[in-house]
Amino acid sequence: MKVAALGDWKKEHLAEEVLAELKRRLEAPKAAILGQLLPEEEKEIRSMYQIAAEPFDLVIAARLSVEGMVQAALGNPGNAEASCLLSALLKGKKVYILEKGLEYRSYRDTAFKPLYGLYQAYERTLMTYGAELISDISEIRRKEPRQAAFPEKNCMDLTGIRVLKEADLNRVRGNGIGAVLIGKKTLITPLALDYLTNHNLEIRRQE
């Protein structure tokens, strides 16, 4: 294929790829965020989930105030944080709490031990309700399978291929594969594109 023709072909199918990406994001599970994530943490979450208030599939507490933790541990939806946590736990949704976001822990060096111990007990109570404590956002990726955003399809990793050809896709047939993952700069030949369309295979680009 000539370089000019390949460039025209890439432009022609750019809109299709953009629409496919929008569809992927719209179908992704939704995460409610309490508090503020760091930019790199938010980017990590957005690679797996849509960020939305309601409805949501899981809750990530980037920050949890003393009041919110205590109210939730007592089963009292007394403020917005406690209400969100309890709503998720009552519905059997996952709740992840970042250790660094627990406000009471910032008083470890100044609080009287009995008071600090009381708040530790409230923290443990939340864990018995089903919440999980994490030290880093990356733990969510390990705990939640990557394909959670695409539960209906198995994906084959073809990121090592620079030019995707029809022959590369023949090995996909009969393996229960519904999508293929390719690199950011991988080129797709017209025959490969036809194959993907004819066999109802979804194409995903590496982020």
Image: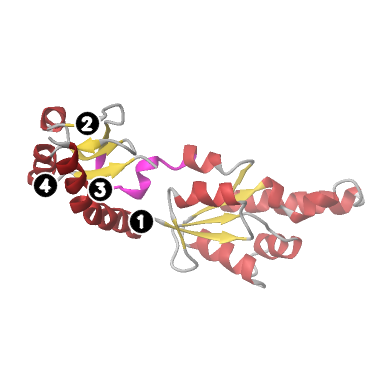
Q: Nearer the viewer, residue 54 or 189?
A: 189
Q: Please state the extent of the stretch shown in magenta in the rendering.
A: 143-154
Please tell me which residue is depicted at 47% across the width and 64% down the height of the picture: 52
Please tell me which residue is depicted at 67% across the width and 59% down the height of the picture: 73
Q: Could you tell which of marks 4 and 3 lies nearer the N-terminus?
A: 3
Q: Which residue is mark 4?
A: 197
Q: Could you tell which of marks 4 and 1 lies nearer the N-terminus?
A: 1
Total marks drawn?
4
Residue 64 x/y as whole percent: 68, 58
Q: Which residue is mark 1?
A: 25
Q: Could you tell which of marks 3 and 2 lies nearer the N-terminus?
A: 3
Examine the structure image and report whether residue 153 is included in the region drawn in magenta. yes
Q: Is residue 99 left or right of residue 53?
A: right
Give neighbour class at mark 3: few <14, some 14-19, many 20+ (Cα, 10 Å): few
Q: Is residue 50 left or right of residue 112?
A: left
Viewer-nearest of labels 2 and 1? 2
Q: Which residue is mark 3?
A: 152
Judging from the image, what secondary structure is the residue with disc 3 in?
loop
